[in-house]
Image (spheres, rainbow, N blue to C red):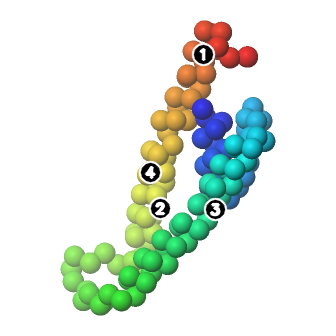
């Protein structure tokens, strides 16, 4: 399970690597990984352009005491921490449970 998740997340991030135990050279996986690559590139590009177009049409709000300035190191650090935590929580269950499930399957005689 971890190998498949890694292969698809790697393909959608335009890296294209996979673990050695995963045989991805099948017509199904070649097609599915190719679709992941296309979606990983173009869906996010189109979404970012749509957000930029929406923000370009909005009026600038006046600065108040409750405004968080976006040009300070505090904003950058908070943004990076939030991105890392959300990405970590996204993949943690699969990466943590994959080896555990493979361990139980190995001792049950269902692998190798």
Q: Secondary structure at mark 4?
A: helix
Alpha carbon distance from label 2 to label 3:
26 Å
Residue positioned 66% across, 36% down in the render? 3
Alpha carbon distance from label 2 to label 1:
38 Å
2 or 1: tag closer to the N-terminus: 2
Alpha carbon distance from label 3 to label 1:
34 Å
Q: Which residue is mark 2?
A: 80
Query: Residue most toward the front?
Result: 27
Residue positioned 40% across, 70% down in the render? 75
Q: Which residue is mark 1?
A: 105
Residue 41 vertical position relative to residue 71 in the rendered view, above or below: above
**Most foreground residue, 27 or 15:** 27
Alpha carbon distance from label 4 to label 3:
26 Å
Could one spot residue 3 in this view of the protein? Answer: yes
Query: Residue most toward the top?
Result: 108
Residue 85 is marked as 4
Alpha carbon distance from label 2 to label 4:
9 Å
Q: Which residue is mark 3?
A: 38
Residue positioned 61% across, 22% down in the render? 102
What crowding class fits label 1: few (fewer than 14 Cα within 10 Å), some (14-19), or many (20 or more)? Answer: few
Q: Secondary structure at mark 3?
A: helix
The quadrant of the rendering that contains the N terminus is: top right
Q: Secondary structure at mark 2?
A: helix
2 or 4: tag closer to the N-terminus: 2
The percent coordinates of residue 79 (x first, y second) are: 43, 64
What crowding class fits label 3: few (fewer than 14 Cα within 10 Å), some (14-19), or many (20 or more)? Answer: some
1 or 4: tag closer to the N-terminus: 4
Closer to the camera: disc 4 or disc 3?
A: 3
What crowding class fits label 2: few (fewer than 14 Cα within 10 Å), some (14-19), or many (20 or more)? Answer: few
């Amino acid at each position: 399970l971890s190998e498949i998740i890694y292969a698809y997340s790697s393909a959608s991030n335009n890296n294209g690597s996979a673990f050695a135990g995963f045989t991805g050279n099948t017509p199904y996986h070649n097609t599915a990984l190719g679709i992941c690559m296309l979606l990983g590139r173009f869906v996010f590009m189109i979404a970012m352009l749509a957000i930029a177009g929406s923000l370009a049409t909005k009026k600038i709000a006046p600065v108040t005491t409750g405004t968080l300035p976006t040009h300070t190191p505090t904003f950058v650090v908070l943004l990076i921490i939030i991105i890392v935590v959300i990405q970590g929580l996204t993949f943690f269950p699969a990466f943590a449970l994959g080896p555990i499930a493979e361990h139980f399957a190995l001792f049950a005689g269902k692998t190798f």
